[in-house]
Amino acid sequence: MTPRYILRRLAQALPTVAGIIVVTFALVHLAPGDPIVALAGESGDEAHYRFMREKFGLDRPLAAQFTTYAGNVLSADLGTSFVHGRPVFSVIAERLPATLLLMVTALVVSSAVGIALGAVVARRPGGALDLGVTVAALVGYAVPAFWLGQVALLTLAFGTGWFPLQGMTDARASNTGVEAVVDVAHHLALPALVLAASELAMITRLTRAGLLQELGKDYVRFARAKGVAPGRAMVRHALPNALLPVITVIGARVGFLFSGAVLIETVFAWPGLGQLLLSAVRTRDYPVLMGVFLLVSLAVVVANLVTDLIYARIDPRIRYR
Amino acid sequence: MSGGRRALRGPAVVALVMSLVLAACADDDEDEAAQETTTTAAEEPVRGGTLVAALSADPGHLNPAITTSGTTHPASEILYNGLVGVDNDLELQPELAESWEITEDGAVYTFTLRDGVTWHDGTPFTSADVKFTFDEMLLKLHGRTRASVGPALAGIETPDPQTVVFRFKAPYAPLLQQLDVTEAPILPKHKYEGTDPSQNPTNTAPVGTGPFKFVSYTKGSEIRMERNPDYFKDDLPYLDEIVIRIIPEQSAQVLALEGGEVDWISIPGGPEFSRLESAQDVEVTRTAWNPGGSNCIMTMTLNLDRPAFQDVRTRQAIAHALDRKQFLDQILFGVGKVAEAPISSGIPWAHHEDVDLPEFDRAEAERLLDEAGWTREGDGVRVASGVEGVPDGTRFAIDFLHFPTFAKYGELVRQQLGAVGIEVTQEPLEPAVFPGPVFQQRDFDTNVISYCNGSEPQIGVRRMFHSSQISPAPFTNAAGYRNAEVDRLFDEAAGEVDQAARGRIYRQIQEIVAEDQPYVWIVETEGARAYDAACTGFKFQNGLFAEAAYCRR
């Protein structure tokens, strides 16, 4: 795992990203729909629609629009949002922290809790606890995130009043310092938990299955025979090997997590990229749509790279050159 | 937040809230319109406090002069003023203009501006701001104002800082209705001069003259505003602060209102409306005014380019086959009314009260279809036999295009036309997609559109009927209706200044189009505002909704 390897991997990502730009540009522009209604409203006259099309360059042939766009992207310019009238870069940057906070929290919670839970139930496979967790995990994995979100909103937020109903902050208070952090954490809890739910379920299942497989192997039996305590044999010996597939899956889930975040953000009025993407789809704000797609694909590429690097760390058999 | 409405459930509070609700209900019965601005005489407005309002999508920017967007307008209008305002009874009120004079039979309007008005940054407001806003923003980028005032206007003059003169090419009647903060908000010239108004940074840190001043805009999350202490209307506003929260889901907005996190939401008619109406600490007021348009009629279009719809009997049959009461009950839960005429009852001076629209009568529909050559065996789909332009043996099967949110209209149309032997296929299309097949390709049989009449038929009604409006521009003459007499009458009405005389012309138009039946006018929809019963003093007819609002808590 050398810096050279990392550079090479990043260089390999370039054609991928170029392909993504071409394909998403085609998909976004060839899909039926027209940003003109969102831009010009519903009651303008023909001259107004013509004027707006020209103003936003929508009257130009698609190929010309693409050349301009690709040229701009190469010079790190994602264009100007039709709706916001500001650079796409800053429109996205304003929303990114909220989504990152939500996704990273969900990722950390689901990974940590999922692995721990998997390890606990693997100690007594077939026991009552194992059975309960298995059923819960299956349900958690099968339930769609938006439904779970609605239910959580109705029961845990509206029903009990334990959690706020919407947003990232309290609208009536202007908190600072520690209070502000607590306020955001309070608002974050429910959406993050819901987003984490299906990931959590899957990671628990994977960890459990991996551990059960490893625990039956000779090296664990040997460790136990030479006097290593059962808990230590599991954590020190079996777990690192059992985690290999888990880590691959966690890395590969970044894209899925984002699509989950799109739904969760809408349910909980969380002011992130998901909401931005959704309204950009509605108004056909092409520059913003392209920008978000580009960012998400980059994130997936990077997540895969990071996964590979962590993999090499954990598994001494793997060496990258 | 600490507490919220749920915590207010002490018996005393319940009693107080109940009495407020009851008082408001009593008002409702007597005079729905008057209840809105006026509060009981004995009641002194309370100063201070924060009002949290919900908005369904991030507006992107806060410049209402360059868009007719249904999110930018409700998020920003309270920061600005128009020259003239409209109150809850649709009466004109002076705003930035103190008075006005109409000369040369309505071709010249002279406005005297209010003295001593300043922008939120302290710069004095003058006639130059008005001229600049019209010339550089409203007449270029505000769709409705550009399309209506634009072609008629010869020019705007500013003889002195206190006077603005609008000079028209010919007498132009509807101007005063088009100068409120929705149609013509006035923006500061000193912030926009020499820039592209659609990319000016002031759009996200706006400066207005309105009752509230901009404080902050957290993208995707909230817009905060504070009381403007120098507002030109004495004593107003009462509230210290307004927070507009972006909550995309309608159901989440309703929960947030009930849970006390939000004080004010806009909702369409439907199941949520009835739920809120029965909630005890929430007040609900209906209004035909909405940021996206007012006085809207859900209208089924029959594409007159299609041979099947050439025969007026077929069009009448379709109108007879629709039980419009069911649309009102099942889709709108009673919020609205069955359409009685082609022009909305919300424009009383133009609305025709006695025009004959076909009543629901299935037997009559069947008879007309038989007569028009669509024969039917048993309960099957009708088949053409001697319909002009349609080969014999063609089944009467049509498509019905609609926004996904209007799916229920499609279901009822399918069911009710199915009962008279017309097979309907629903085609849900997103708003961004819908104008393509309907207005650009004109490739559809029928559809449903919410045509908003607004307050001026020349803008909101003419576009549906005038033959010059058969165009690729969205939400124009979808039926492809042509009638030289109707064209002539609309042109005549545009130059008529006397409102009563204009009303007579519009009634004549309604009689003709009701007979021709290019559309089926189904229901007049209404929106509603739901708000914390502790708050009162709202306006429902324009964007200065909280100018005089206050909350008792």
Image (tube, helix red, strand yellow):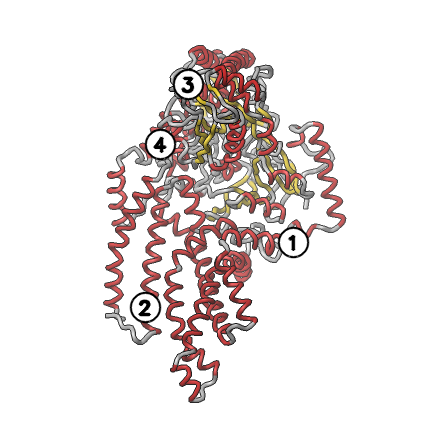
Checking the image for residue B3, the label placed there is 1
Q: Which residue is mark 2?
A: A309
Q: Are marks 4 and 2 on the same chain?
A: yes
* Residue A11 screen position, x and y as percent: 24, 59
Checking the image for residue B152, the label placed there is 3
Relative to residue A108, is residue A310 drawn left or right?
left
Dot 1: element: loop
Would you call the spot at circle 1 few (<14 residues within 10 Å), some (14-19), or many (20 or more)?
few
Q: Are marks 1 and 2 on the same chain?
A: no
Instruction: Say which of marks 4 and 2 sits in front.
Output: 2
Mark 2: amino acid: Leu
Instruction: Say which of marks 3 and 2 sits in front.
Output: 2
As displayed, is residue B367 above or below residue B284? Answer: above
Mark 4: amino acid: Met
Checking the image for residue A52, the label placed there is 4
Dot 3: element: helix
Instruction: Say which of marks 3 and 4 sits in front.
Output: 4
Q: Chain of mark 3?
A: B
Relative to residue A319, is residue A82 drawn left or right?
right
